[in-house]
Amino acid sequence: MAKAKHIRNIEVGGAITDFFVVRWFELRHHDGKPYLMLELGCSRGRIKATYWGEDANELASKITDGDILKIQGHGTDYKGQRWLKIERLRKAKKDEISYEKLLPRGRYSPKVLWTRLKKLIGTIKNPQMQELLHNIFETDREFAKKFATYPAAKLWHGAYTTGLMEHTLRVAKLCDVASTFYPDCRRELLITGALLHDIGKVDEITISGFFDYSPKGRLIGHIALGAIKVQNAIEKIKNFSPEIADEILHLILSHHGSGEMGSPVPPKTLEAMILHHSDMLDAQSEGIQHIIERDMPRGENFSEYIKILGRFIYLEGYRDGD
């Protein structure tokens, strides 16, 4: 039985022994026999798994969401998707592995990303916008620490540490380039909105061995949370222009494009339209990039079915030598 290095390239029958965090689990029954259904996660991704051991019923009372398990199993196929059939499992000992090592990681260090962010803020000459950005990103140390390490989403694009900051910088860069194409585009307003558009995700998402939504995130959502944070920051700046404030808030509130996608208002300015499409471009492109990296090792022409996009992604053209 071939041994897989990690879940990203596990094949049917491929053996694996590794540490995983339990994202969720259920005790189920088939023909009267109890078994465990789990979703497991690690720094390389996530995978669904089953455990049919005689002690499944006993283990169900001992395992909780967020536990770290050491698992031995092998890859199997279920309806065209890779699963893990667990042969042995136990809870990890305290000194064996930390939650941080099980979280997906980004390509760049927070230090590198902060340098890029500060450089971009330095291009904003409008004193009110510059003060707003400085107060949010540099004065609020607790927020800054979270912004540098949080993901951009729970599962789709940027679902790794530093993902939020990487996504924000890519969106801002796309906006910066787009601003040169349209004479009436107010670049500084656009870049300010781009840097602020997702700051509510710091309050929307939680990190506890895996990424999830906070109660506040589910009840209010990152768009409203971000707008509230920016409004509070604006109120602390003396004589901040009400017109500029309204336009910055509009950029945040409209960046998902429509009510169906979570925005309370659609884009109604040139800058808001550019930001919306830049955000969508990066979210979908980065999400597909993740699918390519995840599914390429399996050697198939197409990815697994991507529910959020409603399609398979063609992989063959990305192989080395093509």
Image: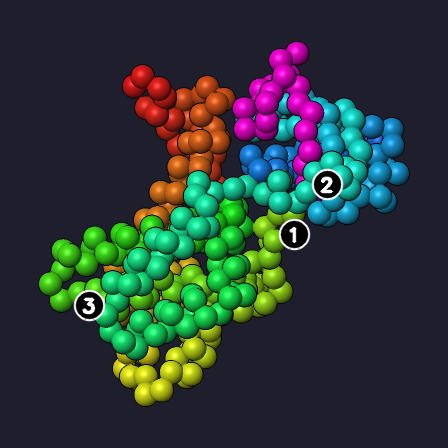
What kind of element bears circle 3?
loop
Quadrant in the rendering for residue 73: top right
Q: Which residue is drawn at 54% across and 24% down?
A: 9
First along the sequence among labels 1 and 3:
3
Q: Which amino acid does label 3 sit on?
A: Arg
* Residue 140 percent across, percent down from the top left: 49, 69
Query: According to the image, label 1 marks what residue?
Result: 208
Q: Residue at x 58, y 38 (%)?
A: 43
Q: Relative to 123, is 288 above or below?
A: above
What kind of element bears circle 1?
loop
Q: In this view, does 294 lie to the left or right of 168?
A: right
Q: What stretch is highlighted in magenta?
A: 1-25
Q: In this view, does 147 lie to the left or right of 245?
A: right
Asked if residue 195 is among those painted magenta in the image, a careful observer would answer no
Query: According to the image, label 3 marks what residue?
Result: 186
Q: Relative to 115, is 91 above or below?
A: above
